[in-house]
Image (cartoon, grey):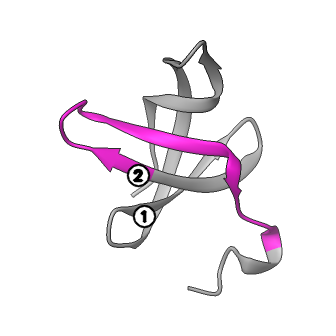
Amino acid sequence: MMQKCECYIHSLSKGGKHQLGEATIIRRLGDNDYLAEYRGLRCHAIYNPFAGRYFVDDVYGIIPKAQEFER
């Protein structure tokens, strides 16, 4: 699946407003749960069909390398 795209990145949010950044969506992990990479961090992402974008959680959704392939 690997695709680079403009996504809303959690750590870039300012004053409650989402900011776009480039991330790579690597693969689907489950129902609306994706493995994404942003600045070398592997983390969870969800797709919001109303916004038409992925939301990448590089703050609370970081996936340790050991757990990355368990699913």
- Magenta part of the protein: which range? 46-65
Q: Residues within 10 Å of mark 1 (few under 14, many from 20)?
A: some
Rendered location of residue 50, percent (x, y):
18, 35
Q: How many marks?
A: 2
Which kind of residue does numbered mark 2 sit on? Ile
Separation of marks 1 and 2 at Cα, in angstroms = 5 Å
In-image side of 47 versus 63 (left or right): left
> From the viewer's perspective, is residue 19 above or below residue 35?
above
Residue at image location 64% in from the left, 21% down from the top: 12
* The quadrant where residue 35 appears: bottom right
Residue at image location 25% in from the left, 30% down from the top: 51
Q: Which residue is mark 1?
A: 33
Q: Which residue is mark 2?
A: 46
- Residue 3 painted magenta: no
Of callouts 1 and 2, which one flags the residue occurring earlier in the amino acid sequence? 1
Q: Provide the secondary structure element on which disc 1 rests.
A: strand
Which quarter of the image is occupied by the N terminus?
bottom left
Q: Nearer the viewer, residue 70 or 62?
A: 62
* The quadrant where residue 68 appears: bottom right
Which kind of residue does numbered mark 1 sit on? Asp
In-image side of 19 versus 47 (left or right): right
Rendered location of residue 57, percent (x, y):
60, 45
Looking at the magenta stretch, what is its main secondary structure? strand
- Residue 49 painted magenta: yes
Question: Residue 25 bears which disc, if any?
Answer: none
Residue at image location 53% in from the left, 42% down from the top: 56
Q: Are marks 1 and 2 in contact (CB under 8 Å)?
A: yes
